[in-house]
Image (cartoon, rainbow, N blue to C red):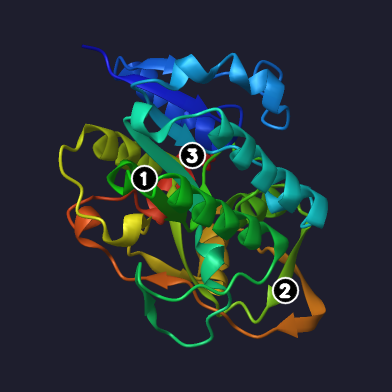
Amino acid sequence: MTKKITLIGSSGFIGNDIKKKLLINKFEVFDPNSKQMNLLNPKHLKKFSKKFINSTVIYCAGKHKQYGDTVDIMINNILGMKNLLEVLNPKNIDQFIFLSSAEVYGKIYKKIKISENTGVNPENNYSLSKFAQEIILKKFFRNELKKLIILRLPGIYGPDDNNTSIVSKIVKNISNDEYFNLTSSGDDLRDYVYVGDLSEILLKIINSKRLNIDNNILNICSGEIISINKLINLIEKLYIKRLKIKKDKMINKTTNIIFKKNNFLINKKFTKLNSNIKKLYQIN
């Protein structure tokens, strides 16, 4: 029997890649766009409730902070989730996978490895909306908690990410001879995950009969830790060209997002940054 997937947010670059992988693997995918199913219109949502029955829901909807880290966007992101859950019954859903963000952990100044049990400290409207949605989901699935999986994502990059990732921003700036705005010392340590690897992890989650996940949360990490300065150097070497850098007058204190690799991902082979950037962005 073909497994049913309801994909909310397939128009974004992450959702679009997930959709492609699902279709290649012969899943039955229902992926309404925002005009077909408006998350901010509760009455509009009711007619779609049957589509979710016996389905795995992948939720990657909501506006990214690139559109502005405003209170209005935060409220709409939270409201969209609340409206959807009001027309659903947790007993009828096979699985619910929510794409959250590593930003819920806040700014970490020490070189410590973050686990799924690390305390959160959302420091902007975007991360606050993600954590609020996590809380709403846990309350909704309180009697069906095994069905809920929260993925906290680091920097996800890909050629179609519309410059939401630092990787794409640097590539765009250096290829167009534009200035890259550096808001820190550049020593910040990050874990960048290719969108294709994320989609493969989702497939593994969907196909897994047993998931050993603490507190319904899974931090997505490749284990390839690199500073922004080293990432810039890597891309400069690929282009054989220097990146123009504009430093903020108010340089923020160096912060790190370093995940401790969990058991679920321990054997996952991630795409390497160096070779992947050259291939993805067609650098000669």
Which image quarter: residue 45? top right
Residue 30 visible in this rendered orientation of the protein: no
Query: Toward the viewer: 181 or 216?
Result: 216
Disc 2 marks a residue whose amino acid type is Thr
Q: Which sits earlier in the primary sequence, circle 3 or circle 2?
A: 2
- Find residue 148 and name its label: 1
Which residue bears the numbered disc 3? 280
Q: Which sits earlier in the primary sequence, circle 3 or circle 1?
A: 1
Instruction: Tell me: residue 68, above or below residue 83.
Output: below
Which residue bears the numbered disc 2? 183
Nearer the camera: disc 2 or disc 1 = 1
Query: Which residue sits at x=36%, y=64%?
Result: 224
Q: Mark 2 and mark 1: span between their CA atoms?
A: 36 Å
Q: Are marks 2 and 1 in contact (CB under 8 Å)?
A: no
Q: Is label 3 in a helix, a strand or a loop?
A: helix
| Residue 262 on image: x %, y % | 25, 63
Q: Which sits earlier in the primary sequence, circle 2 or circle 1?
A: 1
Disc 1 marks a residue whose amino acid type is Leu
Which image quarter: residue 96? top left
Query: Which residue sits at x=66%, y=53%?
Result: 169
| Residue 108 on image: x %, y % | 53, 81
Nearer the camera: disc 3 or disc 1 = 1
Name the quarter where the N terminus is drawn.
top left
- Find residue 70 and name its label: none
Query: Which residue sits at x=52%, y=20%?
Result: 49
